[in-house]
Amino acid sequence: MNSKVRVLADATTKTVVNLSDNPKFGYIRVEQVRNVVDDKGFWRRKPVSAIVPGLLEELQAENFYAGQELSGRIVIKEALTPFNDKTPERDLKIAGETGIVCKFEGSPIYRKTVYTLASNAEDVLIKHDNVDELRAAYDASQKANSAAITSAAGQEFNI
C-alpha cells in the first residue's frame, strides 16, 4: 500500500514554505512512498515527490510543518508536449544515469509529478520506444565500467 503524502522541510534552510523567484509566491515539497511494479514485474517501494506552488500568504496561513500527513496522492503525468514552454527541458524524461531522453515515435516524453487531493487520480504514463538507443548506452556504460575494473585490478595498491 502507498504511504501517506508527507510535507518535507528544505534540506538546507529547514523551512517548509519556501520562497520562489516572485516574492508573492512560494511552494511546499511533498513526498509519498509508492509501491511500483516495473516492466519486468519486480516490486519496489519508490519515493515520489512533488512541488506544490501557491500564494506565499496562503501557504503560510496553512501552518504546514515537516512530517505533516496530507490526504490525496502524488501522481505522475507524462506527455508528448512540454508542460512549460519557457523551460521545456526541465521536464524531459531521462533514462536513469544515461542522460538519454526517453522518446515515443521520435518525440521526447515530458514527465512531472503533481500533488492532488483526488485520492482516485491515476498516473498518465507513456512507454518509451527508443529501446535500441538506451540499450546501446547501457552496453557502452557496462564496457567502460568493466574496463576500469580490469585496469584497477591489475594495479598494485600499497598502504
Image (tube, rainbow, N blue to C red):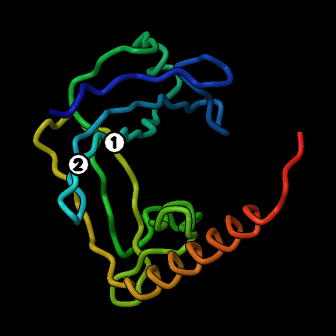
Which residue is pictured at 36% across the width and 14% down the height?
Answer: 68
Identified by mark 2, the residue type is Val
The front one of 133 and 7 is 133
Badge 1: few (under 14), some or many (20 or more) residues near its Cα, within 10 Å?
Answer: few
Outermost left residue: 120
Q: Tell me which numbered mark, 2 or 1, is placed earlier along the sequence.
A: 2
Q: How far from the left and from the top, in percent, is residue 21?
A: 67, 39
Left or right side of 128 for 133: right
Confirm or deny contact between disc 2 and disc 1 (CB under 8 A).
yes
Outermost right residue: 158
Position of the C terminus, as image quadrant, is: top right
Which residue is pictured at 22% across the width and 54% down the height?
Answer: 42
The secondary element bearing badge 1 is classed as strand
Which residue matches tag 1?
A: 46
Left or right side of 154 for 67: left
Q: How far from the left and from the top, in percent, is residue 16?
A: 52, 19
Badge 2: few (under 14), some or many (20 or more) residues near its Cα, within 10 Å?
Answer: some
Any mark on residue 36, and which? 2
Q: How far from the left and from the top, in percent, is residue 98?
A: 56, 69
Q: Is residue 80 above or below residue 94?
A: below
The front one of 100 and 147 is 147
Left or right side of 55 for 109: left
